[in-house]
Image (cartoon, rainbow, N blue to C red):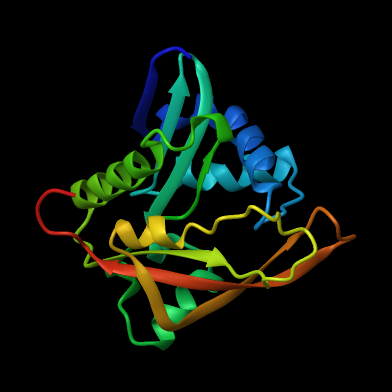
């Protein structure tokens, strides 16, 4: 393992990493609970949003020159309707919320503090680029008896709680993608987690 670095990228500086991040997301999100059957074409188009959206960020973890992890974030106001509407309907001002979208990390690099760094870097970016009152993300909800659930699966709830997030009562949405064991897209329930923007050191 070479020197592990975790750095923020935005705008045009991100463009060179899009193919590597797209491939990484497809690999990592195939695992439970997302079970995502992705394509590089879709991922490249999706990630272009982070190149073009003001206020967006991608935190990249590299082992030497190899991209081994990536974490995305952007103002919730720049997200699609499925993620904005639950907050709008609940009376939140979406322009005051920063969305910590997704994180992927190769298994060999987990447990080394990279996940913590991903949150720290996104929060630092949010503080530097906007006046946000809240942080949020959402997680897919899978039944405990899902046939593809590994026997040793450990949800990330305790990790998120240690970062200061709690499930947001009544804030849910649905999003569609193709599972690895399904012929087409199906809608998945998603639970939002939130915390007030931390004050002082993260």
Compared with 178, 17 (above or below) is: above
Numbered marks: total: 0
Residue drawn at the location 81% of the way across and 53% of the way down: 180
The spot of residue 51 in percent (x, y) is: 46, 40
Q: Nearer the viewer, residue 153 or 24?
A: 153
Q: Nearer the viewer, residue 17 or 188?
A: 188
Q: Residue furthest right?
A: 183
Residue drawn at the location 40% of the way across and 33% of the way down: 112
The spot of residue 113 in percent (x, y) is: 36, 37
- Whether residue 124 sits left or right of residue 38 in the image: it is left
- Whether residue 176 sits left or right of residue 12 in the image: it is right
Residue 131 seen in the figure: yes
Residue drawn at the location 40% of the way across and 21% of the way down: 4
- Whether residue 98 sits left or right of residue 36 in the image: it is left
Residue drawn at the location 49% of the way across and 65% of the way down: 138
Residue 106 seen in the figure: no
Q: Residue furthest left?
A: 200
Res. 71 image quadrant? top left
Compared with 11, 166 (above or below) is: below
The spot of residue 125 in percent (x, y) is: 26, 45
Res. 157 image quadrant? bottom left
The spot of residue 170 in percent (x, y) is: 45, 86
Q: Nearer the viewer, residue 135 or 108?
A: 108
């Amino acid at each position: 393992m070479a020197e592990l670095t975790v750095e923020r990228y935005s705008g045009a500086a991100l463009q060179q990493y899009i193919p590597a991040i797209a491939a990484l997301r497809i690999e990592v999100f195939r695992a439970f609970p997302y079970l995502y059957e992705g394509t590089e074409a879709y991922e490249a188009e999706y990630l272009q949003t982070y190149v073009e959206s003001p206020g967006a960020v991608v935190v990249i973890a590299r082992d030497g020159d190899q991209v081994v992890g990536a974490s995305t974030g952007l103002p919730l106001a720049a997200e699609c309707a499925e993620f904005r509407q639950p907050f709008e309907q609940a009376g939140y001002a979406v322009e005051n919320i920063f969305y910590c979208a997704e994180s992927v990390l190769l298994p060999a690099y987990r447990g080394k503090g990279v996940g913590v760094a991903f949150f720290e870097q996104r929060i630092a970016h949010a503080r530097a680029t906007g006046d946000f009152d809240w942080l949020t993300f959402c997680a897919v909800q899978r039944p405990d008896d899902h046939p593809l659930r590994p026997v040793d699966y450990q949800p990330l709830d305790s990790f998120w709680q240690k970062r200061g997030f709690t499930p947001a009562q009544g804030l849910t949405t649905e999003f569609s993608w193709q599972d690895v064991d399904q012929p087409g897209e199906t809608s998945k329930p998603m639970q939002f987690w939130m915390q007030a923007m931390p004050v002082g050191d993260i």
